[in-house]
Image (cartoon, rainbow, N blue to C red):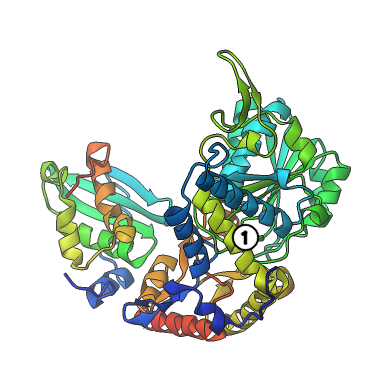
Amino acid sequence: MSDDLYREQILEHYKNPHHFGELEDADITQEGDNPLCGDVITLYLKLDDGRVGDVRFRGRGCAISQASASMLTDLIVGKPVHELKTFPTKDLLEELGIQISPARMKCATLSVNTLRVALNGDSHEEDD
Amino acid sequence: MIQARALNAEAVRADFPILGRQIHGKPLVYLDSAATSQKPAVVIDAMDDYYRRYNANPHRGVYTISEEATAAYESARQRLATFINAASVKEIIFTRNTTEAINLVRYSWGRANIRPGDRILLTEMEHHSNLVPWQLLAQEVGARLEFLCIDDDGLLLLDQLERKLAGVRLLALTHQSNTLGTINPIKAITSAAHAAGALVLVDGAQAVPHMPVDVQDLGADFYAFSGHKMCGPTGIGVLWARRALLESMPPFLGGGDMIKRVKLNEATWNDLPWKFEAGTPSVAEGIGLGSAVDYLSQFGMERVRSHERTLVDYAMEKLQEIPGITIYGPRDPEIHGGSISFTLPNIHPHDLATLVDREGIAVRAGHHCTQPLMERLGVAATTRASFYIYNRVDEVDQLVGGIQKAQKVFA
């Protein structure tokens, strides 16, 4: 785990987010927000034969929340929906590769919580 | 007798043990006093001394240390009465904090006096603690909330005041905005409200620590503030109210200490101020706050205000030089207290606060418990730097340096 919260890869995802935009024919559109920080994302999922065929997101907020959403889209595209229903938060945190302080954890996990709400109806936050 | 002392920030800093700390290898630059102030050693020692030498439940024991505890706690109340120029020590009600003081008024005065269809006037710049209690009361009794708006400089639109006061029972507003720094002209507003038949509650959480406050001169009916923002400990705050009002109000919390005589099915109430203080009070915290009042009184609140005005003046000038910055609140330091909110393009306030923390600088990022105000300003969050007696001009320079460094990261 890097101590540099704003390492190059995170800034790169923040400045040039992957899968950024909307899907007009999305099967699932899910908004998520952290009212305390003002971070907002909307996740658009196109399903294809039980898998995530395509994904987009829109959002605004801090670099951690937006970079983590961008990374999450890379991790879930093409994956089976039944697996993603229990997508582990730690997989996303490992991808971020930085030490997240308790105060910033909500930012880092906004996208994955929104994904769980999109697929399960609620976020089923785990304790891991 | 308190010896007068010049306000030299360098000398003041030596009184605050925490300011000797290093954060990420850099000296702590604490710019979040609007959230909570740091504590001088004398305040910490006063509480420590109580616990070590005369810890006892006050008001009841007839033994020596209980009498000492009672004397120390009640002497703190007397010093607070003098500090805000209350007409009587009986008007100083100890609460847990400003929020609890406002809720005391909501539950006691509000439930007894606000009727269906009555209006409560608030402002767009209120902290949630002076908004949500009135939303709850309005929902409970069927009253209506009205709001005094602000202009783009963060000043109340006082030309609307007279019109908005029609039919209003209570006007509740902040003395100084915790987000914008705006200092509201309470005395003029209060006299307009009284002329319209409304009572006035003032949230003084950001005012009492930073400027002279004379509750009799302001003329308000209720005035609430917290100890922890004025060099005192957490867990102790004050509700001041005019004595006649307090006499007429029903109790807030029921329990020990607030009663005179209790039978199985009824009770009579203790005299002021204890009628509103149920249960064992926060004794150490009260004593600590009394010590904080003594500490601030050495300088005098005029000097505290003038020190902060110098810092705000300098910070405004320096921050304005940062490309793209938006500063909120009035530019005139005469009506801008010691706290400055701003946003930068392309850097979220949380990212900025995290990055300057690496330089040892503590600033606030977020909505500052003023979400409706954030909506009015059209932002999700701001960064806020707030000053106190221990801050130096060069700490403003360090903040500016930290911001410039953050801008390079996000360039």
The C terminus of chain B, quarter of image:
bottom left
> In the image, what residue occupies the spot 52% across and 63% down?
B43
Residue wearing tag 1 = B206
* Residue occupying the far right of the picture: B195
Establish if B46 lies above or below B5: above
Residue B139 on image: x %, y % = 60, 30
Left or right position of B221 against B273: right
Q: Position of residue B264 (x, y in %)?
A: 55, 13
Image quarter for residue B388? bottom right
Chain of residue at mark 1 = B
* Residue name at image x 85 percent, y 44 percent: B194
Q: Nearer the viewer, residue B210 or B132?
A: B210
* x 77%, y 58%: residue: B214
Question: Residue A82: horizontal and vertical position, in percent?
Answer: 12, 41
Res B23 visible = yes
Q: Could you tell me residue B54's position as x and y percent? A: 48, 51
Query: In the image, is residue B131 above or below residue A92?
Result: above
Q: Is mark 1 on a helix, strand or loop?
A: loop
Amino acid at pointer 1: Gln
Dot 1 crowding, Cα within 10 Å, few <14, some 14–19, many 20+? many
- The foreground one among A74 and B348 is B348
Q: Which residue is drawn at 67% across and 39% down?
A: B273
Q: In the rendered view of the protein, which quadrant contains the N terminus of chain B? A: bottom right
Q: In which quarter of the image is residue B249?
A: top right
